[in-house]
Amino acid sequence: MERKIIRLSSVDSTNTYIKNLPESERVDGLVVVADKQTAGRGRLGRSFKSDGQGVYMSTVFKLDCAASETLALTSSVAVAVCRAIEKACGINVGIKWVNDIVYGGRKLCGILSEAVNVSGERAECYVIGIGVNVNEEQFQDGLKDKAVSLKMILKRDVDKEKLLSALMGELEAIETSFLKDKESLYDEYIKRSVMLDKTVILSGDDRRAAVVGTDKDYALIIKYDDGEITKVISGDISVDGIYGIDL
Ligand code: BTN
């Protein structure tokens, strides 16, 4: 694919930058990369620390899929990011439902997928934002037990361009296979997921539950102690043993 790349030294958010472009410039495969972000965004209105040590990029997927498939799309992108990190750095990483890439129980990368100009079930396009912790030497305060960087894992500086190039290659491959290789993508996601059998608590709920599976639409299936089974398609989830959480 002929890929257009916009490189910025600083921007509020690479996702927001793409969403603010005129529609005619939001072309399939466009990549926006920033050295740092002043207002990097995560899921659920959270911020994403983007002070210059990581890779912060967003891309455009023009996909003929329903907006309700955003969960499946984010999950498939998570598979692409795992593949890219493995290729560029040679380490095995896992997926915490629904949009985090983790290593040793800590967050290495976050993914923010946003449907743009949704009309009924269709979206004009999807903006896929990826933030990877790369050359941070440590994390402070609230992130101390939660986050990890590639440098902390590998004990050396990591070439951000090599990682970026691996990410772009794997994202392109996923965009092509998302609609036609659903089964194999789902199987790979399940192999990489770190959720099965974990104890979890949904935000806004005080009951503990166990993860018993993931359905074909990537909803998490959880079972409460009283036997009730629920599918979770959105929201926040605390997972025992991940991000320093002890449930
Ligand atoms: C999350 O952790 O909930 C998702 C974090 C996504 C961060 C990336 S960095 C590049 C892109 N631009 C943003 O503002 N967010 C995403």
Image (cartoon, rainbow, N blue to C red):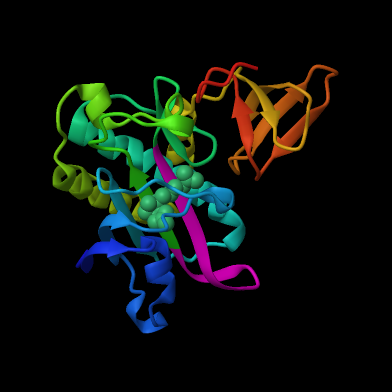
Whether residue 188 appears in this view of the structure is no
Residue visible at 14% across and 40% down in the picture? 159
Residue furthest front in the image: 141
Locate residue 109 relative to residue 233 in the image: left or right: left
Q: Nearer the viewer, residue 104 or 79?
A: 104
Residue furthest right in the image: 226
Label the magenta part by its dominant secondary structure: strand
For residue 222, which quarter of the picture? top right
Work out whether 215 lies above or below 166: above
User: Which quadrant, please, contains the N terminus?
Assistant: bottom left
Q: Nearer the viewer, residue 216 or 52?
A: 52
Residue visible at 38% across and 70% down in the picture? 18
- What is the x, y in percent for residue 74? 48, 48
Assess whether residue 110 is covered by the magenta stretch. Answer: yes
Disc tally is: 0
Q: Nearer the viewer, residue 137 or 241?
A: 137
Q: Which residues are magenta?
A: 109-126
- What is the x, y in percent for residue 54? 27, 44
For residue 155, which quarter of the picture? top left
Whether residue 246 appears in this view of the structure is yes
- What is the x, y in percent for residue 238? 62, 29
Residue visible at 45% across and 31% down in the picture? 141
Work out whether 95 lies above or below 77: above
- What is the x, y in percent for residue 30? 29, 67
User: Which quadrant, please, contains the C terminus?
Assistant: top right
Locate residue 106 relative to residue 115 in the image: left or right: left
Locate residue 87 relative to residue 28 in the image: left or right: left
Residue visible at 31% across and 24% down in the picture? 92
Assess whether residue 183 is covered by the magenta stretch. Answer: no
